[in-house]
Image (cartoon, helix red, strand yellow):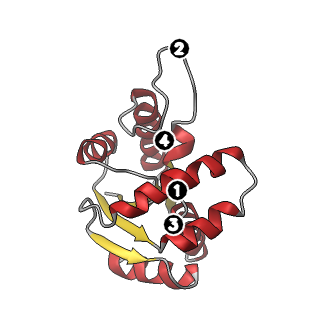
Amino acid sequence: MPDGVLIIGAYGTGKSSLCEELAEVLESAGVAYGAIDLDWLGWYDAPGRRPGHDRRDPVALANLSVVAGNYVSAGVEHVVIAGAVWSEPELAAIRDALPFPLRVMQLTIPYEEIERRLSASVSTARANDLGEAKQQSERGVLGLSDIVIANDRPIWEVADEVLDWLGWR
């Protein structure tokens, strides 16, 4: 039975970068894995859709369910998922969409580093994310995760800590 990890945290904490690094390490080790960025699964607009990134969005959850199911059918052992999740109902909806158990880790970093990272990005979306990131980082530890890990060192060191915690070595 495959299992998964959901990396949560404020915008700019490095969730997607850590997801990418974990995927690279697993691939290099010959481990069957899948990687999912929740933002991409719910990035659309349609009539009647509320703006924002509510992780309970039915289209995003349906996409997650299909992608995760395809990964399981393909024989993956582990799935790495990255996304900002801010409430127990959102987390419950994500868990309900998955055909495997999910552990959750929150990635943290000081707001000054988030500001440096997001300010360097040229996209309008990233500029808008900076304001949201400030509010998110002020929330601190959310109480939704099994573990909180600081992203205050090279990403490969953070990935090593996560893989050790997960027992995926």
Image location (x, y in percent) of residue 59: 45, 28
Q: Is residue 94 left or right of residue 126?
A: left
Image location (x, y in percent) of residue 117: 64, 67
From where the camera sits, is residue 76 visible?
no
User: Residue 67 bears which disc, if any?
Assistant: 4
Image location (x, y in percent) of residue 61: 40, 35
Q: Quadrant of the N terminus?
A: bottom left
Image location (x, y in percent) of residue 166: 34, 74
Q: Which residue is mark 3?
A: 13
Asked if labels 2 and 4 touch by Cβ distance under 8 angstroms, the answer is no
**Nearer to the camera, 165 or 115:** 115
User: Foreground mark, 3 or 4?
Assistant: 3
Decide which of tag 4 and tag 2 comes sooner along the chain: 2
Kind of residue at disc 3? Thr
Kind of residue at disc 4? Val
Kind of residue at disc 2? Pro
Q: Residues within 10 Å of mark 3 (few under 14, many from 20)?
A: many
Q: Secondary structure at mark 3?
A: loop
Residue at the image position 49 percent from the left and 51 percent from the top: 132
Q: Which residue is mark 2?
A: 47
Mark 4–mark 2 distance (CA, rounded to whole Å)? 24 Å
Decide which of tag 3 and tag 2 comes sooner along the chain: 3
